[in-house]
Amino acid sequence: MASFDVDRVRADFPLLARRERGKPLAYLDSAASAQKPRAVIDAVSRYYAEQHANIHRGVYRLSEEATALFEQSRAEVARYLRAPDPRGVVFVRGATEAINLVADSWGRAHLRSGDEILLTAMEHHANIVPWQIAAERAGARVVPCPVTPRGEVDLAAFARLLGPRTRMAAFTHVSNALGTVNPVAEMTRLAKAAGAAVLVDACQSASHFDVDVAALGCDFLCFSGHKVCGPTGIGVLWGRPELLDAMPPYQGGGDMIQRVDFAGTTYRAAPERFEAGTPHIAGAVGLAAALRYVAALRPAAHAHEQRLLALATERLRSIPGLRIVGEAPDKVAVVSFLLDGAHPHDVGTLLDADAVAVRVGHHCCMPLMSLLGIPGTVRASFAFYNTEEEVLRLEASLRRVRAMTA
Ligand code: PMP
């Protein structure tokens, strides 16, 4: 196994030097948003300082340079996803916008009364609500696939729920609330065999391991830049170019048109068709820098995260009254848990007093929490820049909380 020098990696992240109440900050909330390495901060500031102009329409050198940078970023995203054609990469604000785009545009073209959209009960609200809106408009129905008490998609139920009415199956690669890695290649195979289109929400996988759209066989895949150490406000929708080209526009405006006439307007092919207006050029440049940065650290970074997960699981299990929620054998470095007699919000607040930053609540997965019969959890999520010492600080802090609340 390649060695991984976490101290050297941490030195790339200025924010990790931050102190809270005189203690070093233990940032254990990377599933919500990852911190940014200097390479990303520098790429964004260099873009604004030296390379910025509006893209695509300029005939002057600077605009051509900015256009080339933007398009290079698109090509880098395509390479990151092992997508053969960069035309399948649409820059959006984030996963939320990507799913809304597909639900709205693909939904208009394909969803009809009586159709079904198969989701799983562990989806983020961003992969539920857009489908509910699209279903309501079309007279279609959203069908949730159950999740087992261990926090895994019930694959037999998934296969059973697929049928001739299933037009779309949309599911997450990795659960943001529990860390479960879903068998998405198998789920995609089943859904495609049933004749459904497939969207994979890779928000929580793209940040931990390599994602390969060709190997997955899905039709759409999305992720948010900010969870992969990139800027906020930029994300990716990847779609099969031929599918994207056949979809109606999502938003209208400049750059997405071939010709505008009051008698009727024609649209460009993908990806420009879905990129109306001035895009987040600096965001795309920063995202490409982020993907280069994280790709260069793998697979050692992933192995390091898995060691943190194993340590955190073992240490937290040894705390009396602590129950880990989500115990699938295949997980990313996320540990969700409950502490007997203590509300997750109180646990989070007490951890914050020790400068340990975790997230508490339903994690935008209310249906999953209802299914598990819990109001929410405390979630510690680790990135490759976290340390074993931070895991031990989490444990020590939880033992103090336990002593206070038991
Ligand atoms: N899907 C999953 C699995 C997520 O974890 C998130 C972010 N928590 C989203 C979708 C939505 O991402 P964003 O808020 O960046 O659009």
Image (cartoon, rainbow, N blue to C red):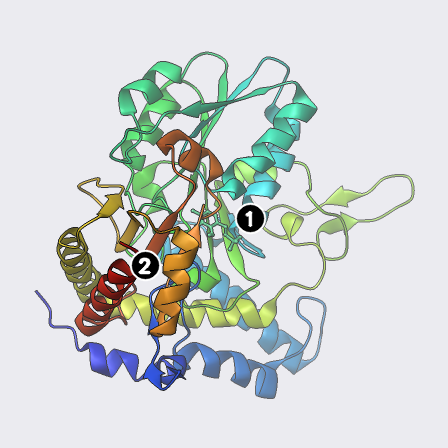
Of 146 and 269, nearer the camera is 146
Residue named by callout 2: 381
- Specify whether 329 is left or right of 144: left
Q: Amino acid at mark 2?
A: Ser
- In the image, what residue occupies the spot 66% across and 22% down? 138
Give how far across and how far down residue 218 sits, in percent: 39, 36
**Rendered location of residue 266, percent (x, y):** 76, 42
Tell me the amino acid under the disc marked 1: Thr
Q: Earlier in the sequence, mark 2 or mark 1?
A: 1
Q: Is residue 156 above or below residue 230?
A: above
Is residue 128 visible in this depiction of the protein? yes
Q: What is the quadrant of residue 24 in the picture?
A: bottom left
Q: Secondary structure at mark 2?
A: strand
Q: Position of residue 333 (x, y in %)?
A: 25, 56
At numbered mark 1, what does the secondary structure look like: helix, strand or loop? helix
Instruction: Tell me the tag on residue 96.
Output: 1
At horizontal 35% and vertical 36% (from top left) the residue drawn is 217
Counting other residues with Cα less than 10 Å from the Cα at mark 1, is it few (<14), some (14-19), or many (20 or more)? many
Could you tell me which quadrant the C terminus lies in?
Answer: bottom left
Please state, as top left, top right, bottom left or bottom right, where the N terminus lies in the image: bottom left
Is disc 1's CB within 8 Å of ligand 1?
Answer: yes
Seen in the picture, residue 145 relative to 20 is either above or below; the reply is above
Q: Dot 2, how many residues are within 10 Å of its Cα: few (below 14), some (14-19), or many (20+)?
A: many
Q: Is residue 180 above or below residue 14?
A: above
Viewer-closest of 97 and 216? 97
Report the Cα–Cα distance between label 2 and label 1: 20 Å
